[in-house]
Structure formats: C-alpha cells, structure tokens
C-alpha cells in the first residue's frame, strides 16, 4: 500500500467517524426536541439540571448537522478524489478554525467584561433565590461540589440569601463539608 493510498484510507475513516458522530448528535438532538421527557427518564437528574440551564437539543442539532456535512464532504471527497468536494471540506474546516480563533480572541479581550457581567447578574441572583428556588439551589450545589468552589466569588455571595436567613449557615461546599458552615469556617476554608 502506497503512502497516498494510506492517507486516503485514513481520511475516509476519520471523516466517517466525524459523519457518524454528527449523525448521533443530530439524532439525540432531535430525540430531545421531540420527546424530552423520555430523555429525562433515561438519564435522570443530571440531564434535567443541564436542560434547565441550556436548551441542549437545538445546540446538538446544529453541531450534529455541521459535523454531518463536514464528514460527508471529507469522506466523499477522499473516496472520489474530487478536488471540488475536498476544497469545500477544507473551506468549511478553515471557516470553523477562523471562527474558533476569533472566539478565542474575543474571549480573551472581553474576559474582564464577562466576569463583571457575571458578578453583576449571578451574585444578586444567589442572594435573592438560593434556598428559595429548589432547582437553582440544586444546580448550584452540584456545580460547587463538582468544581470544588463556593459561589461565584466566595462564601459572601450567599450572605442574605433565603438559605442563609433560614439556616444561618453557608452551603456545605463553602466549608469543605464541615458542619455547621458558619462565617468563621467559610472564611478559613480557602474555597473560592
């Protein structure tokens, strides 16, 4: 087997994997859009918390469709050795690559702005609804436990929240599960 034959076979296999992955994402996205309840029944509490934050189904459909097109163009272009299909494939990949670079530059430039906006929105939300809204409380508890943090900034984000007003404690994650999680323990736990 020659070098170019090997490259052709590898490109076909690689793009076939992308095509199948895109088809899978597209199928799951359509499934969640059409019958979200059966998806929730199968995948349980994790999926319900994710679906409450972001409408995942439409995101999956878009990403799946893009991957399906990329995989199809690459696989057919490599199989038929069609310059037109391969140029379209590389054009789409180049556009995605440029968009990723642009998104990275925008993210770097506006990181401070995003942090300020998040602080301005999330901190008052925590003070207003943490402990009163069960779904928000559950999402924040899971998030804080998974990434080992306490609020957006630190334990003071929860001061004055319904949870704090009722129990006079901070969430368990703020004290590394030491109970009761009072201000002294939260301040010395170094969880932020």
Image (cartoon, grey):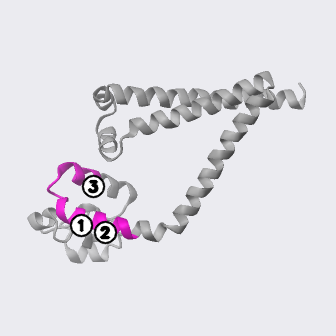
Residue 149 appears in which quarter of the rendering?
bottom left
Q: Position of residue 111 (x, y in %)?
A: 48, 67
The residues colored magenta run: 116-141
Q: Give the total number of marks visible in the rendering.
A: 3
**Residue 48 vertical position relative to residue 75 in the rendered view, above or below:** below
Residue indicated by mark 3: 141
Residue at 71% x, 24% y is: 76
Give the residue at mark 1. Answer: 124
Q: Is residue 78 left or right of residue 21?
A: right
Q: Secondary structure at mark 2?
A: helix
Q: Is residue 75 magenta?
A: no
Which class describes the residues within 10 Å of circle 3: few (<14), some (14-19), or many (20+)? some
Earlier in the chain: of badge 3 and badge 1, it is 1
As measured in the structure, the alpha-carbon distance from the residue carrying label 3 to the one carrying label 2 is: 20 Å
Q: Residue at the location (35% across, 69% down)?
A: 191
Q: Is residue 191 left or right of residue 183?
A: right
Q: Mark yes or no: residue 165 visible.
A: yes
Q: Position of residue 30 (x, y in %)?
A: 41, 27
Q: Residue at image x 36%, y 67%?
A: 117
Which of the two residues, 138 or 110, is positioned nearer the viewer here?
110
Q: Do we see residue 176 in this rendering?
A: no
C-alpha gap between disc 3 and disc 1: 17 Å
Residue 120, numbered circle: 2
Q: Is residue 149 above or below residue 87?
A: below
Question: Marks 1 and 2: CB-CB under 8 Å?
Answer: yes
Nearer to us of marks 3 and 1 is: 1
């Amino acid at each position: 087997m020659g070098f170019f034959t090997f490259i052709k076979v590898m490109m076909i296999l690689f793009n076939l994997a992308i095509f199948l992955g895109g088809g899978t994402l597209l199928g799951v996205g359509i499934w969640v859009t059409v019958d979200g309840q059966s998806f929730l029944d199968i995948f349980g509490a994790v999926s319900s918390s994710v679906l409450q934050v972001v409408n995942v189904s439409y995101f999956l459909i878009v990403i799946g469709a893009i991957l399906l097109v990329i995989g199809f163009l690459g696989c057919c272009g490599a199989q038929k050795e069609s310059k037109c299909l391969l140029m379209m494939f590389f054009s789409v990949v180049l556009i995605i690559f440029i968009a990723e670079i642009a998104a990275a530059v925008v993210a770097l430039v506006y990181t401070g702005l995003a942090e300020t906006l998040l602080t301005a929105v999330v901190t008052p939300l925590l003070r207003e609804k943490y402990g009163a809204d069960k779904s928000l409380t559950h999402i924040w508890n899971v998030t804080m436990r998974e990434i080992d943090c306490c609020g957006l900034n630190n334990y003071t984000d929860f001061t004055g929240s319904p949870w704090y007003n009722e129990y006079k404690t901070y969430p368990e994650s703020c004290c590394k599960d030491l109970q009761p999680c009072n201000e002294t323990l939260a301040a010395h736990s170094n969880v932020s």
